[in-house]
Amino acid sequence: MTTDEKVTLSEEKETLLITVYGKAEESRLPDSLLRDRFAADAIRRINYDFSKLKVRRDDMISLAIRAHLLDGWTREFITRHPDATVLHLGCGLDSRVFRVDPPATVRWFDVDYPEVIALRRRLYPERAGYTLLGSSLTAPQWLDEVPADRPVMIVAEGVLPYLREDEVPRLFGRLTAHFPAGECAFDCYSRFGVRLLRRHHSIKATGASVHWGLDAPHELEVQVPKLVFLTEVSSHDPAQLARMSRVARLSYRVFMAIPALKKAGRIVRYRF
Ligand SMILES: C[S@@+](CC[C@H](N)C(=O)[O-])C[C@H]1O[C@@H](n2cnc3c(N)ncnc32)[C@H](O)[C@@H]1O
């Protein structure tokens, strides 16, 4: 393995550095939620000026909360279906497969652009039952590589807003036609939330464009009839909120008091 991985990704691919750095740095805090030592090891070996992303402590904690929730939903699904397939879309350098550490009965697929997958291969070890697929999510062929014989847990963290409006329902249409049954869990933003996300200092630093918004979870059920909405989380656990700065806690209270802001960002779960 190399020890100095120069990274020259741009736009939506570069945003993976925001999330892996945020998770790595949160893991160095004494009260860390995620304890992602895999991300911490990976960023030590990446040659990139992370300071340009201006990832703040509050951002790190928010990223850890989101990742921890999605890890928990993935573990739950695997407990119910020890023979599951896990499909991790737009994995970037996220170490979910190592954090969740599924039993050998689970088949796990990480999917992202070929350049990202090539970088992942240089930074993380292989493991049994784990396959990396290098493709754009919007290309139809990659799904042919994934056997359709088992219940599937589909996880997409910080990914779908980078897809265009029509690409997300089309992707879920293909996924729900491919697998017999399963669940999908991902974060999403209302159209207003997407406008706020475009102004986020770290995303602006990468030049990435954000497109897909979902004003209400039921909208996706209409576009993808096999999907059944299960649950959403749009607020932080008070114990985690208490770790944030005063300014963040105050802004959060304001957000929660105004309906359009409260629903600006959510983490949702569907079944099919
Ligand atoms: C903000 S990063 C999140 C990475 C990872 N999920 C995490 O939470 O650390 C966004 C990721 O989505 C990937 N991505 C965006 N659009 C994609 C597409 N059309 N096909 C495949 N990957 C895509 C990017 O390459 C990047 O790795």
Image: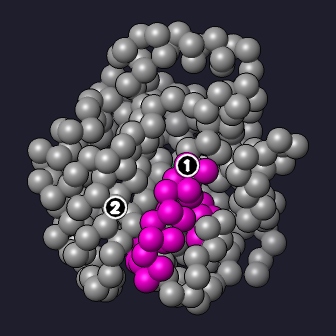
User: Which is more N-terminal, label 1 or label 2?
Assistant: 1
Secondary structure type for disc 1: helix
Cα distance in 3D space between marks 2 and 1: 14 Å
Q: Describe residue 37's horizontal placement relative to residue 229 as left or right.
A: right
Which residue in the structure is indicated by mark 2?
A: 183
x 28%, y 85%: residue: 149
Residue 185 picture location, percent across and down: 40, 53
Q: Is residue 248 visible?
A: yes
Query: Which residue type carries mark 2?
Result: Glu
Q: Describe residue 7's horizontal placement relative to residue 113 as left or right.
A: right
Secondary structure type for disc 2: strand
x 59%, y 64%: residue: 96
Magenta includes 85?
Answer: yes
Magenta includes 270?
Answer: no
Can you say which quadrant of the picture contains the N terminus?
Answer: bottom right
Residue 69 picture location, percent across and down: 55, 49
> Measured along the vertical axis of the image, is residue 46 above or below residue 247?
below
Label 1 CB, ligand 1: below 8 Å? Answer: no
| Crowd class of label 1 (few under 14; some 14 to 19; many from 20; radius 10 Å) | some
